[in-house]
Structure formats: C-alpha cells, structure tokens
Amino acid sequence: MRIGDAKQSYEADEAIWTSSTQKFWFAVFLLVLAVFPFVADAYLLYIGCLVGIAVISTTGLNILTGFTGLISLGQAGFMGVGGYTVAWFSLHTALPFPLTLLLAGLLTAAVGILVGLPSLRVKGLYLAIATLAASVFLHFIFAEWQAVTGGMGGLSLPPAHLFGLTFQSDFEMYFIIVPLAVVMVLAAKNVFRTRTGRAFIAIRDRDISAEILGINLLRYKLMSFALSSFYAGVAGGLFAYFYRVVTPESFPLSLSIFYLAAVIVGGMGNLLGGILGAAFMTLIPEMLNLLTATLTPFYPNAPVFMSPMLGIIFGALIVGFLIFEPNGLGEIWQRVRRFFRLWPFRN
Amino acid sequence: MDWLFFGEISLAGLAMGGLYGLIGLGFVIIYKATRVINFAIGEIMMFAAYLFLAFAGGMEMSPWVALPLAVLGGSVLGGVIEKVMIRPMLGESSISVVMVTIGLASILVGLVELGWGADPQLLPEFLPRKPVFLGELYLAPKIAYGFLIGATLLLVYLLYFRFSRGGVALRATASDQAAAYSMGINVRRVFNLAWVFGSLAASLAGVLVAATGGLSPQFGAVGLSVLVVVIVGGLDSILGALIAGLFIGWLETVAGAYLGGQYRMPATFAVLAVILVLRPYGLFGTHEIERV
Amino acid sequence: MILECDLTTTQAVGSDVGAASGKTEHNKNILEIHNLSLSFGGVTALRDVSFRVPEQGITTVIGPNGAGKTSMFNCISGFYQPQQGSIHYQGKPLTGVKPPARAALGLARTFQNIALFRGMTVLDNIKLGAHVHMKSGLLASLAYFGPARREEMAVRREVERHIIDFLEIDHIRRQPVASLPYGLQKRVELARALAMRPKVLMLDEPVAGMNREEKEDMARFILDIREEWDVTILMVEHDMAMVMDISDHIAVLNFGQVIAEGLPADVQNNAEVIEAYLGTRDMDSLRHKLNPESEVA
Ligand SMILES: Nc1ncnc2c1ncn2[C@@H]1O[C@H](COP(=O)(O)OP(=O)(O)OP(=O)(O)O)[C@@H](O)[C@H]1O
Ligand SMILES: [Mg+2]
C-alpha cells in the first residue's frame, strides 16, 4: 500500500486515486494543463492540441484493441466519419460544437457497430480484416460521394462556435480539445472500474470462458466497437475543427497504423500508457522536423529523408516495443513511479 | 456489350490473378507452417522488385541474372525476418505477431523510399515484346510471360510440397506441430524455411507484377489484394489461394476497366465482406475447433 | 438420497432416469442428462450418456482420461451442442439456451485448465463472476458515480464477506492472477464461480495438480460450500481418495458411455468400473484408486 492508510470503505478503495500522493499529482497535472496555454508559444500550443486529439483517438483504439483484444485497422476511417460529420453539420446547420461533436461520435459509433457485426461469426484476425475492409469502403465513400463529402477536394468548414463565441486559433481550440480529452479519458477509466470494462477484458483474455461465465460476447464486442468509434469520431471531429478542412487524404490507412503504434508503444490495455503513447508518437514527427531543420544547412536534401525516416521509426517502434517492452511506456512509467514512490509525502 | 474487349480484359485479369495465386501460395505456406498472418507480404514483393531494379537498372546486369538474384534477396529477407522478428514473438498472441508484420511493412516502405526515392519507377524491359494472341484475344506480352513464369514456379512448388521431404515436414508441422516435433522434425527450421519459401514466391511475383505496372513505395498495397485472396480462399488452403487468386485478379481488372480504377479495391473488398459474413473461414479454409 | 445403484449399461441407466424423473424423483434431480451424444468428426466424445444430478449433494463424474467428462461439462454449459439427447435443468430442457443465459440460470463452473483472466486482479476476476447479476449499462459505467458505483459497491461487499473471507484469499485480492501459484489460482477460480451465485456448481478437476495440503483445503472448501451455500455440486475428479470421501453420488464414464452410477461404495466395487481403470494398465494409479484409504491422512 502507498502510505499505509487503512482503507475506510470500499468506495475509497475503488477510487481512481487511492492516496493523497496520487490526488496531489493529479491536481498538479490539471493545473499545468490549465496554465499551459498562457505560457506556451504558438508552436507548443499547436503540439498541445495535436496531442489532445491523439490522446482521445488512442484511448478509443485502446478500448477496442488493448482492452477488448479486437485489433482494428479502421481507426483512420472512423476518425474520417467523425471529421466529415462535423464538417457537414458545420456547413449545413448552425449547430454549436458540442452538438456537432456529439453527432460525430454517435454516427461513428453506429458505423463502428456495423463494422463490428461480423464479430458475430468471425474473430481475431478475421475481424481485423473486416475493419480493413471497412476502411477501404469508408475511404472510397469519402472520395466518391461528391454531394456530401466534396470528393477529393474535401470540405472546408467554419470554425467551431458556442453561444456566439468562435474557436479559431490554436489557443481557443486548446480549451475545447484538452478538457474534452481529460473528461473522455476519465470516463474510459470509469468503464474499467465496472462490469462493462471487466467484460471487455475478459473477452480479450479468454472469450470462450467469458461466455460460459455469462458474458454475451456479441453484445460486449459491439459495445466496445461503439465506444471506441465514438472516441474516434469525436477525435475526427476535433481534427476537422482544428484544421478546418477534411479531405480523403486526411485519413489514410497509415493514420490507422499510427494509432495502432501509439497503443502498442504506450501499452495495450493501459489507459495511462495510451496517453503517453499518443504524446510520444505525436512528438516524434515534430522532433524529426526539428532535426531536419537543423541538418538542412549542412545536408540540403535532408528534408527528402524526413518522410521515409518517419515510416522506419514508426515501424521500428512497433516492432521494438512488441519484442522488447510489450507492456509499453505505461509499464516503464510504473517502474519509474515505484522508484519515486512516496515523493513528496515521505512520512 | 463488346465481348472481345470483355474477353481480353478477363484474360488479362486471369493472368494477373495467376500471379495473385502465386503470392497467395507464399502467404498460405507461411500461415500454414507458422500461423502468422503476414501483413508485410506486399512489402516483401516490393523489396524484391526494387532489388531487381537495382541489379538490372543501376548495376546493368542482365535481367536474367538480376531476376534470380532479386528473388534470392527477397527470400533471404524472409528468412531474416523470421529469425529476427517473428521467432522472438513465439508464444505471443497472434495479434501481437500480426502487428509486428505491420510494423515491418512500415519499415520496408521507409527503407526503399530512402534508397530509391518516392517517385514511381519503371523496371527495365526483360520479357519478350511480341504480342500474344489466344485465338482472337490479345494479351499484353508482359502479362502473358509474367503469368507463364509465375505458373511455372507455382507448379514446381506444388510438386515439391507434394513429394519432397521438405514438403512432408512442412505439411506435418502444419497439421500438428507437437506431433511433428516428436517425430524428429526440426520445427524451427521448418518455420524458417516456410518464411524463405513464402517470400521466394512473393518476390518472384513482385518482380513480375512490377514489370507490368511499375514500381513505387506504395507498391506494397498489392498486399491488400493478396489479403483478400487468402481470406476468400481460406487462410490455410493452397487450392483456395489459387482459385481465389484467379477470381480476385479477374474481378479487380474487370471492375477497373468498366467502372474506373477507384472501383478496384471496393469491388474486391465487397467480395471479402460477403465471404466474411457467409463463410468466415473462406471457401476452402478449415474452421478451427476451439476448446476450453 | 438416491439409492438406485443398479450398475447397468447406458441404455438401462438412461431408461431408469427417464422413468424416475416421471415419478417421485423429479424435483430431487436438479440436472438430468438424457441420451446425450456428441462427436467431433470421427471422435465420439459422448455416446448416449444419461445420468442425473440429485439436488443438494455432491455428484462426481469419474472416468479415465478422454472419457468425455469435460465434454459433458461443456454440453451442460452450452459451449458444445450435442448431436443428440437433451439436458434438463430444474425440470426444463436447456436446448437452445445460450451459454450466458445458462450462467444466469445458476449454472456456474470452473475449468480443468485454469481459465482466469490474466489481465485482471484477483478481485476483478471474482467480481466478473457476478456479471450476470449486475445491470449497469455502458452509460452508467462511463459516468460511474451513481447507479454503477452503488452496484459495484454492493457486489464488492458481497464478494468480500461471503467469498474472499470464506476462501481465505484476503491477502491476494489486489494481485494480478498471473502471479499466483497454481493452487491459489484454482481457489480464485472457485471464488469466481461462487460469485456467480450458483445453483449448480460444476468443478472440473478441482484438486488436479495440487499437493496434499492444498487438496485437503480444497476438499474442506467444497464440503463447506455444500453445508453453507444452497448449491448442488457436480464435480469431475481423478483423485479417488477425495472422490470416495466427499461424494454422495457418482457416475462413471468410460469411452463416452456411462458404465455405472450410484453410491461411492457401490461404484467402487463394480466390476466394470474396475476393468475400466484396469484398462489403463497403470498399476500404480490403479492401486491408488482402488485403495483410497491409504491416501487419506
Ligand atoms: N473440441 C474438440 N475437438 C475435437 N475433439 C475433442 C474436443 N473436445 C474433446 N474432444 C475429444 O473428446 C474426447 C473426450 O474428451 P474430454 O476432454 O471430454 O475428456 P475428459 O474425460 O475430460 O478427459 P481428461 O480426464 O483427460 O480431462 C477426447 O477424445 C477428446 O480428444
Ligand atoms: Mg477433462
């Protein structure tokens, strides 16, 4: 136990933060998030928003792949559904952003359920291939359904708004993205404190036994698909508001791989790890950019290597973590934390 | 309807499908022996095709020297992959292993782009250019000869697996690993050889496909078509891979010719979706029985 | 207790059960298996199997390896669909009832090869057993505070008071199950099955692979469960000492057929049973099995 305080009640025992040390650090973390936009420069703000979107999407994929064991290659497609939904509603209605994002999440959840339906008959990798098929179809729809999606040119949308306020700059978007990310991660954490989350994990670990123990597999697999795609849809919607344009090229298959990598690098079935993975994976291209910028004066064609290097690094991270650190950054984080266990309440 | 056109398109599609069948065979060999679904098969094809480009184009070797060298290179790559990336994953969940191959694909794409740039390239011509006619029907010579070469290797494979000792070991391992092990078969070696042979088939097909359609770092996307082929045929069925290969190759080409290139993938993936719902383990695959 | 211990072939046992259930024994048999047949391709796992599980007692199914015992459990759980025959639970046929629904009806079980969820703690594994008795949906779970938390706490209290204390696993409740020794894992599996609030508790080889001390603990738990919980126990076990010690009713399976059914003493002396075990040609285990007294400390 942490500080050795006797647990007064089961409520306290099952809280997310069971000790004052943890509560303290979470409060500090929230404070940092709140102060960040006022001290950060434009570039850091931009990164902050990107990380926020990535955290939401990664958390969604983690629910499906990390916790329920259903590997999905459709994450980018799902985000696309959310992105196009927000774009369409912003262009054709005056709905404020909470509603457009909610609609994006719900519509994507519906698509997710549809994609998950084959899990009635197939599982494991066959299901992964069903999600791959879904991403092919979705990409096709994005590119070809001119009337709604604007075809290859995509859609440009007006900024997010609420009560007459518009959210245009990165600074303003930060106040939509980051609070939403915090709330959605906490909600996901809640799920895994209840029967729903246990059912997901049980399906991942031993689906047949889970069924014999009373878990309706189809129901919970579809629920996981729905929840996960809801997160993807909201993340896609935020993406649309953030870049103010969506095209079929915004959601390529490689984006799905990016999120898979984030989940793996962070640690499958570990929400905190997922956050770390999302941040880490978002930062890599930026650091590579920086490196390229520094190198260009000496090697003028350094930028040419940027994109292939990114692919190699992403791939190597996936392979390397799976082989050497299968529990990901989340596990590494735990180790570090154990090391500094009681700080700053050393009593 | 122009039946001549349809016939020619179909013929081209079937020839392409023959190559898909060959790649599918490579895929199935790996799957049967090691139960690994290799998402990087398209990238292995691509890698071999780039090797060919380097040998025949850059180093100006004779294509008929470059071809076997490139195929050899692809096979060695397969063996190395098995040793370095797949073997350490023994006993891990199949999902983790698949993700390793996905990561591998990403690495290979990056590597060829580093080496040869992102622009599409044409392979040096090496197949006879004399037009091929089957009765009335014209078939592009590259496709025709590509098919012939591919079909030859396919035949060699089928005979080899049927009759050779290696083939028997492979089939024994596929049907019961533990039993094969207890009979003194070196299962590890079989795993490695399966990757070598599987990659060999993919590599040859890779050069032949690239010879007809050109080569770029996106070339690995053919891997998606192959995935459809093996799912439709049944992951562990060689016959399934051959039949589904022909069918998918045909369908893709016909859909591309009549509806437009953007319909190629949706058409084949529609078949995939139907199969997943109606016959999840493919036309010829075996349904694994689960136990508690 | 049931005293019908004719040691007949399957056919006869089958018709006996049928007749009995028609008359007086009906409410006393919580489970009745009628003429069950199951095969996998060429392998016949069960051949026209009939037997019954009297309410409240401990019924044990014994038989050599591969006799079809686990397959029978899987049929009762609904995981295998028998090609023929039926299973009646509390007088009603289970045909067409899906596994989760069977769990909700009170058919709980443990598995021969421990089937704990490795990614969860001991506590979560046990709580998962209560799944069918809980209601929170996705939205309640996302919100947590409110109904979901109330329900979770109620289950936690129940699990702590009635199961964790009872099975003496307080000290490991926070541990991930994968880190536990084998014997404790078996105990956690039992705990999880108890959390399902079983009416019939099916235990597939509860003491296999345990040392003497662990076996004794487990036997004591099983007896205590029979005393304190309102539950029927259906068990598969190879350890004859324990089987003869604690069972009220025994059915013997051999090559997918019931070759004997009745009281422990009768089954023990049945010629066919002895032969079935002789058939294993394993003299050591035979001696063990036929002289259970020597095993009991
Ligand atoms: N899913 C399955 N597929 C194929 N055969 C099976 C399957 N399940 C069981 N069998 C076969 O059915 C027969 C009975 O197996 P079962 O597991 O029921 O035996 P058992 O009595 O539990 O044996 P043990 O004492 O070893 O646990 C065996 O021959 C087994 O190989
Ligand atoms: Mg058994």
Image (cartoon, grey):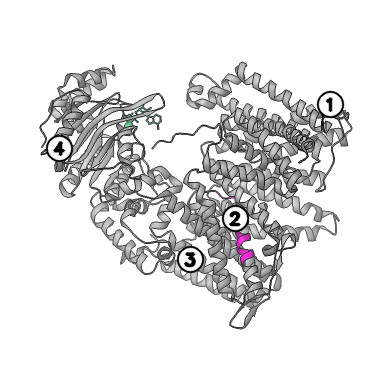
Given the image, on which type of amino acid does mark 1 rest? Trp
Label 4 residue near ligand 1, CB within 8 Å: no
| Residue underneath mark 1 | B64
What x and y, as percent, mark residue A222?
A: 47, 54
Can I make out residue B268 in this image? Answer: yes
Front of the two marks 2 and 4? 4
Residue B233's quadrant in the figure? top right
Badge number at residue A186: 3
Front of the two marks 4 and 3? 4
Q: Secondary structure at mark 2?
A: helix
Q: Nearer the viewer, residue B167 or B93?
A: B167
Task: Check the residue under mark 2 and report the chain it is in.
Answer: A
Q: Secondary structure at mark 3?
A: helix
Q: Secondary structure at mark 1?
A: helix
Q: Nearer the viewer, residue B35 or C76?
A: C76
Q: Is residue B98 above or below residue B72?
A: below
Front of the two marks 3 and 2? 2
**Label 4 neighbour load within 10 Å: few <14, some 14-19, many 20+:** few
Please report whichever mark, 3 or 2, sits nearer to the chain's N-terminal start. 2
Say if mark 3 contacts mark 2, CB within 8 Å: no
| Residue underneath mark 4 | C22
- Which quadrant does the C terminus of chain A fall into? bottom left
Label 3 to label 2, Cα distance in Å? 21 Å
